């Protein structure tokens, strides 16, 4: 159980670091509207959005917690599941956990 939570936290941490790094580098937070025009930075934009995705889901779900708690918990669960998979990828690829 601890390892699963650790992997989810690693995924959320990576999402937060990438989101803040993108915001510092470009002056705007990562959001899907970045993909509306093609340019040389498109691979970086897609990579930033894929890595930042779990944090966006968790933040979005927590924003709707008062309005629609069932939908909000579903969105938060999707974000945590995505961050878990991302954390497992990071831990196995870069740190050799098996």
Image: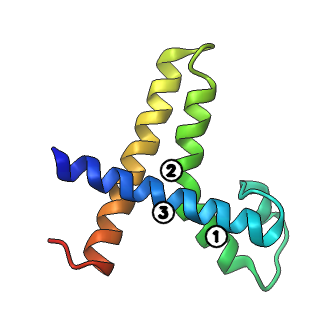
Quarter holding the C terminus?
Answer: bottom left
Q: Secondary structure at mark 3?
A: helix
Q: Tell me which residue sits at (45%, 53%) in the image.
A: 12
The residue that label 1 is drawn on is: 46
Q: Residues within 10 Å of mark 2 (few under 14, many from 20)?
A: many
Single out the mark in the foreground, 3 or 2.
3
Q: Position of residue 28 (x, y in %)?
A: 81, 59
Q: Tell me which residue sits at (54%, 48%) in the image.
A: 55
User: Image height check: is 24 above or below 38?
Assistant: above
Q: Earlier in the sequence, mark 2 or mark 1?
A: 1
The Cα atoms of the two marked residues, 3 and 2, are separated by 10 Å
Q: Tell me which residue sits at (61%, 23%) in the image.
A: 64
User: Image height check: is 72 above or below 67?
Assistant: below
Q: Earlier in the sequence, mark 3 or mark 1?
A: 3
The image quadrant that residue 73 belongs to is: top left
Q: Tell me which residue sits at (72%, 55%) in the image.
A: 32
Single out the mark in the foreground, 2 or 1.
2
Q: How is the image coloured?
A: rainbow
The residue that label 3 is drawn on is: 14
Q: Is residue 5 left or right of residue 52?
A: left
Quarter holding the N terminus?
Answer: top left
Q: Which mark is residue 54?
A: 2
Q: Residues within 10 Å of mark 3 (few under 14, many from 20)?
A: many
The Cα atoms of the two marked residues, 3 and 1, are separated by 15 Å
The image quadrant that residue 96 belongs to is: bottom left
Q: Position of residue 66 (x, y in %)?
A: 60, 14
Single out the mark in the foreground, 3 or 1.
3
Q: Secondary structure at mark 2?
A: helix
Q: Secondary structure at mark 1?
A: helix
Q: Which mark is residue 94?
A: none
Q: Residues within 10 Å of mark 1 (few under 14, many from 20)?
A: some
**Front one among 24 and 49:** 24
């Amino acid at each position: 159980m601890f390892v699963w939570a650790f992997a989810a936290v690693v995924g959320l941490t990576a999402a937060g670091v990438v989101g803040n790094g993108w915001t510092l580098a470009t002056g705007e937070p990562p959001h899907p509207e970045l993909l509306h025009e093609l340019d040389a930075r498109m691979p970086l934009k897609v990579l930033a959005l894929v890595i930042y995705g779990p944090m966006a889901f968790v933040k979005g779900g927590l924003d709707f917690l008062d309005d629609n708690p069932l939908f909000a918990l579903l969105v938060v669960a999707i974000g945590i599941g995505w961050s878990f998979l991302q954390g497992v990828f990071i831990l196995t690829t870069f740190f050799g956990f098996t």
